[in-house]
Image: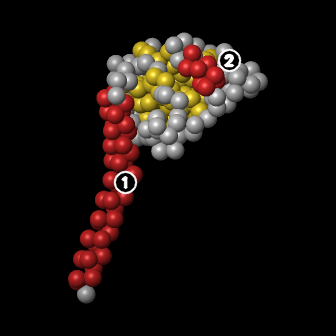
């Protein structure tokens, strides 16, 4: 009778450990590797970087949409809050922020067709518990760890629209507040 109880106990302990690893450690590892790959490929900290137009030759992530133009900013708030300011777009577009555990902690529309759409969306990213003063209309996002990623997606199914989306990257900001 003892052997089955010991076996079931060992199985339960192993299951709990695997559950902890998959839900807690794995997302941090995945985000860490993604940030390493991005910075290793020349993406600067706190600077928007436009990805090349998606074609079968330029695919670096699984199933990116060829109709979207992507821009990414690697964020580190260890030294203080980071401010993102991104112009709206006349079609579908969004700004997402992912924390160190790959959780989407912010999703905002950049669609200029929406009523009362501002000319640009401004977001401040800061560590949890850090005091941040923000002007009216500025969103504040708190993260538990200093590492994060910001991603812009803009509908750009043609080369002309992709070029127009790329022209907005230099006027977008991602840097210390």
Could you tell me which quadrant the C terminus lies in?
Answer: top left
User: Residue at point 41% right, 19% down?
Assistant: 46
Q: Would you say 115 lies left or right of 61 here?
A: right
Q: Would you say 48 lies left or right of 5 here?
A: right
Point out which mark residue 22 bears: 1
**Colour style of the rendered protein structure:** secondary structure
**Viewer-nearest residue: 78 or 164:** 164
Residue 13 position, x and y percent, is: 29, 65
Binning the other alpha carbons within 10 Å of mark 1 as few (below 14), some (14 to 19) or many (20 upward) gives few
Mark 2 near mark 1, Cβ–Cβ under 8 Å?
no
**Viewer-nearest residue: 19 or 111:** 111
- Give the tally of numbered discs: 2
Residue 86 seen anywhere in this rendered image of the structure: no
Binning the other alpha carbons within 10 Å of mark 2 as few (below 14), some (14 to 19) or many (20 upward) gives some
User: Residue at point 26% right, 77% down?
Assistant: 7
- Image quadrant of residue 32? top left
Residue 123 seen anywhere in this rendered image of the structure: yes
Could you tell me which quadrant the N terminus lies in?
Answer: bottom left
Q: Earlier in the sequence, mark 2 or mark 1?
A: 1
Q: Is residue 176 above or below residue 18?
A: above
* Residue that carries the numbered disc 2 in the rendered image: 118
Residue 104 position, x and y percent, is: 51, 38
Q: Is residue 18 above or below residue 109?
A: below
Point out which mark residue 40 bears: none
Residue 16 position, x and y percent, is: 34, 61
User: Residue at point 53% right, 17% down?
Assistant: 169
Q: Is residue 108 above or below residue 136?
A: below
Q: CA distance from mark 2 to mark 1?
A: 40 Å
Q: Residue furthest right?
A: 115
């Amino acid at each position: 009778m003892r052997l089955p109880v010991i076996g079931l106990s060992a199985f339960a302990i192993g299951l709990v450990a695997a559950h902890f690893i998959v839900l807690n450690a794995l997302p941090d590892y995945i985000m860490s590797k993604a940030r390493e790959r991005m910075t290793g490929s020349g993406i600067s900290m706190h600077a928007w970087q436009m990805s090349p137009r998606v074609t079968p030759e330029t695919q670096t992530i699984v199933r990116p949409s060829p109709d979207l133009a992507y821009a990414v900013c690697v964020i580190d708030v260890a030294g203080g809050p980071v401010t993102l300011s991104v112009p709206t777009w006349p079609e579908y577009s969004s700004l997402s922020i992912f924390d160190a555990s790959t959780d989407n902690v912010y999703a905002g529309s950049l669609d200029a067709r929406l009523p009362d759409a501002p000319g640009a969306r401004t977001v401040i990213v800061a560590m949890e518990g850090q005091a941040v003063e923000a002007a009216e209309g500025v969103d504040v996002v708190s993260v538990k760890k200093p590492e994060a990623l910001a991603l812009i997606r803009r509908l750009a199914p043609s080369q002309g629209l992709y070029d127009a989306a790329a022209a907005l990257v230099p006027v977008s900001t991602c840097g210390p507040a």
